[in-house]
Structure formats: structure tokens, C-alpha cells
Image (cartoon, rainbow, N blue to C red):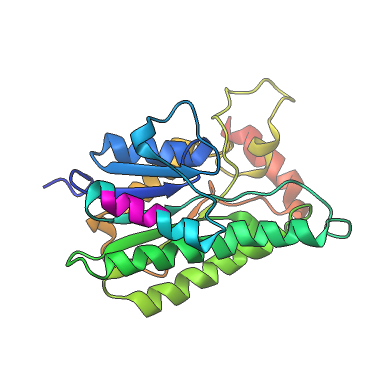
Amino acid sequence: MNPLDYAGRAVVVTGGTRGIGAAIASAFRAAGADVLVCARTSPSAVPPGDFFPADVRDPAQASALVASAVERFGRLDVLINNAGGSPSVAAGTASPRLHKKIIELNLIAPLHVSQAARAVMCTQPTGGVILMIGSVSGTRPSPGTAAYGAAKAGLHHLTTSLAAEWAPLVRVNNLVVGPVGDSPDVPAPGAVSTIGRTVPMGRGAGADEVASACLLLASPLAGYISGASLAVHGGGEWPAYLADLRDTAYRAGK
């Protein structure tokens, strides 16, 4: 039996119409799952039957999203809380309204959707899995996106708390995602990309690589993993005070 075969399993991906969310949805579909994605506005690239319009910051809409998945598929096995993000803005000048919306989207909304999903998963003999798409911004200073970083830090704590409360039927884990972008070509001397210079792997993650990590954590292969944070960040970031060593190591690696 293939542990990464998701045939007969139902998956919800919030913010699943573009970027990482779209890659996650595509990966689960390719693995055989029935997938429902949501966003605030209807996309052109997602089949109408696979999309539900929802602003997951609203508890009623979050509940309606989960109810729609159960109505369509008869069950809910995996929830990916991917919806999130933030513009770059100085903390000292950002409006209280902006800070509130950022924290609602990146921290409160995942709690709303998770609560609704848990109510369904706990009625299923096989339970379910909830994955949070976190960020390295929640593990180190996040200048320019302070509220976002604080929300992602809170998402880590939310993960551990829900995993403790909802075990053993519902597993909850967090992915700490670093910069995401296409793998760069081997650069010419002096043309190393910004991401390549800061990440030990020399490139940003592919969205498909984040999706692969979700497939793993939602599968029976990770059946005893709950309350964990999986770093999907290419080795982290070189400390600034090691800039000379970083440059030497990067050149040597080429």
C-alpha cells in the first residue's frame, strides 16, 4: 500500500488558488485526493466544483467552507491552513486597522477553520490532519512585517496547543517555510541572487517542494508526528556576522 496515495481522501486548502496554495492543491490532486480550495475572489484557473469563495477571517465563512467540503466529499481528512501574507510596512507607521487584519488573516483565521475541521474529523474513525503554513518570519526578527512575524510565531504555539488538545484523532503540525522562488540558474561571478546569498542551499524553495512536505506530514508516514514544526527553509539563513565565511563557502560550493 502506498502511504502517499490519497485516493478517497478529502482535502481543503485555504488560499489555494495561487502560489504555494495552488501547488499544494495540485500535489494532493495528483496523489488522488478530492480537493476543495478557497479564496476571497473566484479564480479563472480552478474548476468551479473545486472552489468555494470564503474570507476565512470570518468564522461563519470558515465554517461554511468546511461544511461545503463535507457536503461534496462526505468527509474531511486534511486541512491546509495556507491563506496568509502581509505587505511590507514599517511597524511605526502602519495603521492599527492593518495590523489587526494581518493578525486576523495569519493567526485567527487558521484557528477558525481548524475548529470547524476538528468538529468533523473527530467524528471519523480515521480522524484527520491539520497543517499550518508558517514562516521563518515567526522564528527571527521580521522588520517590515512585524505583525506578520508575530502572527506566525503565534501560529507555532497554536499548533502545539491544538495538537495537545485534539490528540489522538487529530494531528496538527506546522511548516516553517523560508523564501520561495524558482531555483536560480548557476549564476555568473558577482551575480549571486539575494536568496542564494542568504540561504545555505543557495536558492529559494520551489512551491512544489513545500507541497511535497505537506504530502509527507499528512500521510501515515508521519503518523506519530504531531505538535511539530518542520523547517522547510533550505538550511536557514547565514548569520550576518559570518558574511565573509558565507561568500567563501558559496564560491567553494560552485
Picture coordinates of residue 119, whole percent (x, y): 33, 69
Q: Which residues are magenta?
A: 65-71
Counting every numbered tag in the picture gives 0
Judged from this view, the residue extending furthest toward the left is 1
Residue 119 appears left or right of 144: left
Residue furthest right as drawn: 93
Magenta stretch: helix, strand or loop mostly? helix
Give the x, y percent position of residue 219: 27, 54
Residue extending farthest to the top is 188
- Establish if 52 lies above or below 176: above
Residue 186: image x %, image y %?
A: 58, 23
Which residue is depicted at the point 32% across and 61% down?
A: 129
- Determine if the magenta segment contains residue 48: no
- Percent across and percent down for residue 184 are 58, 27
Residue 175 appears anywhere in the view: no
**In the picture shown, does residue 201 fall above or below 147?**
above
Instruction: Tell me what residue is drawn at x 88 percent, y 56 percent.
Output: 93
- Residue 124 is drawn in which quadrant? bottom left
**The one of 166 and 68 positioned closer to us in this rendering:** 68
Q: Quadrant of residue 181?
A: top right
69 inside magenta stretch: yes
| Relative to 47, residue 159 above or below | below
Q: Can residue 162 be seen at all in this image of the molecule?
A: yes
Residue placed most toward the observer, 163 or 213: 163
Question: From the viewer's perspective, is 104 left or right of 75?
Answer: right
Tell me which residue sits at (71%, 54%) in the image.
239
Q: Report the side of 40 relative to 93 (left or right).
A: left
Vertical placement of residue 212 versus 107, above or below: above
Query: Where the C terminus falls, by quadrant?
Result: top right
Q: Nearer the viewer, residue 69 or 93?
A: 69
